[in-house]
Amino acid sequence: MGCVCTPQIVRRDLTNINMEKEKQNIQVGMVLHYFKSQIKIPDVQREDTAWTLEQKQLLIDSIYNNYDIPKFYFRKDDADDEIWWLLDGQQRLTAITNFLEDKFALDGGSDVTSIPKEIHNKKFSELSAKEKGKINGRSLDFVVMVCSEEEEEDLFLRLNKGTPLNAAEKRNAVKGDFKDLVKKLSAHAFFKTKINFPSTRYAVDGVVAQLCVLTIHNAIVDIKGKQIMDMYVAKKRFPEKDKIEKIVSASLTWMNQVFKKKETYLKKYSLWSIFIFYNEIKNNYSISSITKEEFFEFFNTFETDRQKNNLKTEDDSSFDRDLNTYTILCVNGSDSQQALFKRNSILIKKFLTTFPNIETKDSNRNFTSAQKETIYYLCDQKCQGVPRFKCPVNNDILLFEDVEFDHIKEHADGGKSTVDNGQVLCKACHSHKTKSSIKDREKGK
Ligand SMILES: [Zn+2]
């Protein structure tokens, strides 16, 4: 009789952890499918030390003989219910998938095994249908938890290294101005009823700290655990905290007015994006003509379209590449500078397309880069041509760097810097138009 109690297989049980969880029985035969589609391995979980062949063989032996296999633990992704982050069981899952993919053979009859002689040294594909069925049909216990990233970190540490402080607890341990600022803003009404993530104190503090970091930098930066922790330490004494509080608080108040109730998409990654978006448009455009209801409608349409787009394939004629990119960047590294920046530019572009008559705050200024990108996109990346002039590039697709942005009604004649008063022209057409409008103006004088 083989002993299956190798120390690597017997792991701590998390059954008593007080968190929302669902149990599922997944058959071994389905593991490959899950492993390739919805299971993701967080970076911190990746282990360098792979199991030995003997350890892998032992696990399959246990599956075959219906011995106890410890539960597998996952965390449901905040953004996508279909994604499960693996918390515990990486070695075991890897061993199972490797076996199903014929990457190793069963044991050849050492004293630790207890599989019948007929299947010694056999790979999965070499087994009879009956033996395959015995392995494929064995069910494994998957426990899928719903918890915040902070709680996940805590769980992971407990699973692996006992019970040290989690990141939020560490942040909490740093006393000072930044902590007080976070505490104060965390009490904002917006967090009471509108968000769609666990409104635990640590989770809300974490998001507030991220919004403060963005505001302090006055730029889009990484807002990962490290940047947050650094800020708690760097701003223990923080004379400008009232100024930051005002900006963040005003944005939260605006969000609280725009969203009347809890919306499913008001996850952490959406909050960061809406916050960045609001501060950018508020600082650069005159938005007073847009009502809160219109803003809500805009966000709602954006999210509905995005969900619909997630179901489409790339060859679908209505597939929206921008929305697809946005979704990808919500799932992976969503708190990185790059993801935040790209998501924001997509959101701003959709906004300027929806409200093309929005003017820049400073009426003397030229188009913003976001307006230029939107105009370029709306003009299909082509020169729009001018009357009575033969465009040298005609209908060619032009690079963003090679086009010029023209006020349809000239700036000098009171034409505004709005998306609907903008068009793409090639250099030749633009120069022709500029020359003739100068002439026209001179004639008019
Ligand atoms: Zn042209």
Image (tube, rainbow, N blue to C red):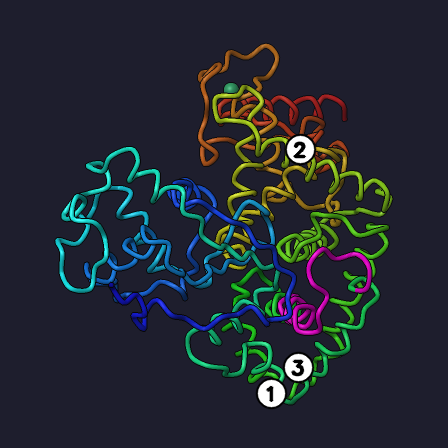
Q: In this view, does 144 lie above or below 153?
A: above
**Residue 118: x and y, percent?**
16, 43
Residue at the disc numbered 3: 178
Q: Is mark 2 on a helix, strand or loop?
A: helix
Return the disc, 2 or 1, that comes first in the chain's sequence: 1
Of marks 3 and 2, the one in the foreground: 2
Residue at the disc numbered 2: 305
CA distance separating discs 3 and 1: 9 Å
The main secondary structure of the magenta stretch is helix
Residue at the disc numbered 1: 174
CA distance separating discs 2 and 1: 42 Å
**Quadrant for the C terminus in the image:** top right
Q: Is residue 95 above or below residue 171?
A: above
What range is drawn magenta here? Answer: 192-211
Q: Counting other residues with Cα less than 10 Å from the Cα at mark 3, is it few (<14), some (14-19), or many (20 or more)? A: many
Q: What element carries label 3?
A: helix
**Residue 317: x and y, percent?**
54, 19
Count every numbered label the image shows and give the total. Answer: 3
**Magenta highlight on residue 198:** yes
CA distance separating discs 3 and 2: 38 Å
Q: Counting other residues with Cα less than 10 Å from the Cα at mark 2, is it few (<14), some (14-19), or many (20 or more)? A: few
Q: Is residue 170 above or below residue 288?
A: below
**Residue 182: x and y, percent?**
70, 76
- 87 or 344, nearer to the observer: 87
Tell whether 304 sits left or right of 329. right
